[in-house]
Image (cartoon, grey):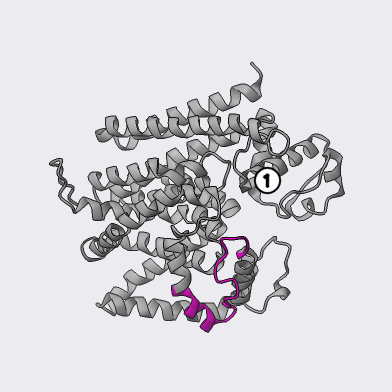
Amino acid sequence: MPLYILAPILIALFGLMAGVFLIFLFASEDFNFLSIFYMTGLGLRIFLSFLFYFISFVFYSDTRPGYLLPMDGWLYSEQGWQICKLAEKAIAVTKENFLFNPNIYFIGHKALSGNITSYDFFASHVYSIFDYNPLSLFFIGSVASALAALFVYFIAKELFSKNVARIAVIFAFFWPSFILWSTQNLKEPMIILFVAILLWSIFYIRKFPSPLFLILPSISIWVLSKIGIFYLSIILGALFFVLLFLLLNVFFKNNVLKILVIFLLAYVFYIFFKDKILQILIAKGIYSQGDFKSVFEFLNFSRTVRAHGNLQFLKDADISSVGGTISFLPVGLFYVLFSPFPWQLGSLAQIIVIPETILYYLTFPFAIKGIVFAYKKRFNQSILLIFIIAGMLFFLALIEGNSGTLFRHRSIPFYLLFIFTSIGLSLKKWKFGIIYKC
């Protein structure tokens, strides 16, 4: 059997064995429950990946064979395949020269997306090993999404309880859009996997110091530095501020006062290091630091670029200053949490997500309830997770200007937010006689 046909099967089998092994190693007391849900969640993702792949040849055999939905995954795949073919010709390709490399024309067409990322190079490595078959990338995304759900369970169990973790993992396994993103060769499943691994390592190492928990976070930090640098920065920043928060216990007892002090210190930090922060934000991009006068100008530009299409929102908003950013943040956060809205029916995709959107609206009050409970009763355990989720939501509120792309990108903090939704639900008394208690 050719390797390009065998590869997806091997990837699926690896994902199955890896998940079962992790359950046995870290959640053996809940092995039956988790293993059934894991195999079901992984199997559903694998099945839909193959189904979408097969159907695509019926409708798009000449334009984007293998890719049913017009998302970034097709661009990652095509540009990754171009890089792979150039490497076979011994033509060196880097992020800096790819978009302007005349050798791209040797394989028929130039860059497709106008952008190049580390994930394109990841796709090229997969193709160089297994040969061209988008199913390999689809199955990798499916495995990453299913494993991410497991680590959401591990985090929830470590911080709260097994029952909270059970509810959280059901959300993570079967939330419709989480499943969809995992079938289309997108970065989000891999980003959330390594975000979850990094967070779990931080929480777990407190109880069980081991060299393994130096390796896992190191790998996670390296991967996120390549494909999710903004999310890594938020995690490291949140970790720093939580440590600072705990140190402030020596001077202040009121938590609100401590948070205000932290925001003040964050602003002072920005004043002294704003040029360095801007340099990091635009590192290895096609823009130079001289193109922007401040971090806020860069964020404003990034948001403007994204504010296009029939789902754009607040296109003319100006966040190029501190005042503009602060005044816009509540509105941007509202869109992050609640868009796309049920009345936005511009396409079939928007109609399809209406049931999920309504379900999310129904569960959101439980998320608030869970956050309030965690703040009051599990403050030390939950403060880092709350800071990270808040940081990600604030970041998306500032840079997103299109409800469609936002709907996908917010899946990363939503994987974690559903832990608090599960806490809120666990505080309810169910008719089935099961009472979840934190």
The residue positioned 67% from the left and 41% from the top of the image is 77
Q: Residue at x 55, y 30 (%)?
A: 50
Amino acid type of the residue tagged 1 in the rendering: Leu
| Residue 53 image point, x, y percent | 59, 32
State the SS at label 1: helix
Does residue 393 belong to the magenta stretch? no
Depicted 409 relative to depicted 330: above or below = above
Residue 308 magenta:
yes
Q: Residue at x 56, y 36 (%)?
A: 138
Mark 1 surroundings within 10 Å by alpha-carbon count, few (fewer than 14), some (14 through 19), many (20 or more): many
The quadrant where residue 100 appears: bottom right
Of all residues, the one furthest to the bottom in this rendering is: 323
Residue occupying the point 50% across, 37% down: 142
Q: To which quarter of the image does residue 303 belong?
A: bottom right
Residue 239 in sight here: no
Report which residue position mark 1 lands on.
75
Q: Viewer-proximal residue, 333 or 52?
A: 52
Residue 240 lies left or right of residue 289; in this view the side is left
- Relative to the observer, which residue lies in front, 58 or 245? 58
In the picture, measured across the screen, residue 298 lies left or right of residue 374, that is right
Residue 186's x, y, as percent?
A: 57, 45
Quadrant (top left, top right, bottom left, bottom right) of the N terminus? top right
In this picture, which residue range is highlighted in magenta?
Answer: 307-330
